[in-house]
Amino acid sequence: MLVAVLELCSAALIADDPNSMFSVYVDNDSRTLKPNHKTDRHYTHGTKFVYLFQPDWNWFRNFSDWNVAAPDESVDSMVGLFLGQNIYTPDYVDEPEKRSDEDRVFAGWLYSGIFAQRATDHKMEHLELNIGVIGPSSKAEQVQKAIHDILNSDDPIGWENQLDDEPALDVTYMRKERWLDGLLKPTENTDVIVEYGFTAGSVHRHAQAGVTFRYGFNLGNTFGPGRLDLPSGISSLRKQDGVRSGYFFARASARAVEYNRFLTGLDTEPLVGEFQVGAVYHFKKFDIGYSQTFLTQEFEGQSGNDSFGSVFVTCQF
């Protein structure tokens, strides 16, 4: 998949628009992306394609200018259009006789939408509208079975009992700020970025906050790694063509969960922690990143903590 994306991006570089980008994000909990621990359960796969650009829309100009910067600060802004799919399963995806009655059910989520980002040198805001469908129309069953065929894995059993078709809508607001003062102020090779925000809708309702530590070179006025649920837009836009940069990072966050559609019927944990480690490298017009994410338990009786590997590629053209 990465080779195909890189070829697509290389072909797109023929266009002479420096403010357009294409990104792909992939999460998976098998040994393909997480060689140290195969699970294949719960949030087991996610794919997201994002097209980023800077349109000349009235509402977007108003969003870019509204109450974010001091009079003498410049503001960068960008819009993203995206298409994604998430896949959720119970444990023992190919051995139903071993499953607990108190576990996730099979579910797929196919979604699309739009987000807008704006940023000064030290803070960034992300506002997103996500619309889609949960159920057989998401085609998650077909995608997971195709992936298992490619990887020569056993077929998942139980998709006939997946969640029924239903519309899905979420709105997300996130804010990131680079820590500027005290012991955590930026240096030539390090910085600390705090983030906080919320999601509200028919799929998820939660508030979250976290902190990211980066160590690398040529960090610039960027805001850390992109991820499937919070793509990198402004950060990729600000990467200088021809200037290499890279960093290792560690991110810790927590979600106060009021509702998660994919945990309906379970005794959910009100607070879920997340820890992510990885690396990002920029060269020419490309960003490439890899990470692993570890989560605390999301519901009572869960059979161990979950984790997944992630990879993303962004190209500017």
Image (spheres, rainbow, N blue to C red):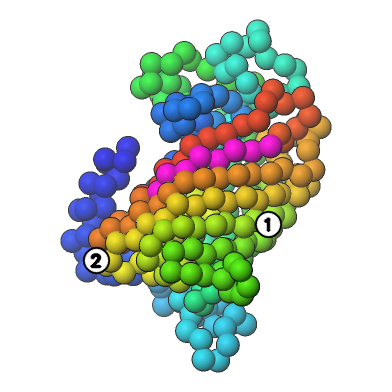
Query: Vertical placement of 19 versus 27: above or below?
Result: below
- Residue 13 place in picture, x, y as percent: 22, 60
**Amino acid found under the numbered disc labelled 2:** Gly
Label 2: state its secondary structure: loop
Q: Residues within 10 Å of mark 1 (few under 14, many from 20)?
A: some
Which residue is at the front of the view, 173 or 283? 283
**In terms of sequence position, does the residue under pointer 1 or pointer 2 come before the other?**
1
Looking at the image, which residue is at 28% across and 58% down? 283
**Amino acid found under the numbered disc labelled 1:** Ala
Label 1: state its secondary structure: strand
Residue 197 visible in the snapshot:
yes
Which residue is at the front of the view, 47 or 273? 273
- Residue 218 place in picture, x, y as percent: 37, 66
Based on the picture, tell me whether residue 191 belongs to the magenta stretch: no
Q: Are marks 1 and 2 in contact (CB under 8 Å)?
A: no
Which residue lies most toward the front here? Answer: 183
- For disc 1, the marked residue is 209
Residue 20 tag number:
none
Quarter of the rendering containing residue 286: bottom left
Report the span colored magenta. Answer: 289-296
- For disc 2, the marked residue is 242
Query: Vertical placement of 167 versus 72: above or below?
Result: above
Looking at the image, which residue is at 68% across and 57% down? 209
Looking at the image, which residue is at 44% across and 64% down? 189
Give the prevailing secondary structure in the magenta stretch: strand
Residue 53 visible in the snapshot:
no
Q: CA distance from mark 1 to mark 2?
A: 34 Å
- Residue 298 place in picture, x, y as percent: 72, 36
Q: Quadrant of the N terminus?
A: top left
Q: Quadrant of the C terminus?
A: bottom left
27 left or right, relative to 282: right
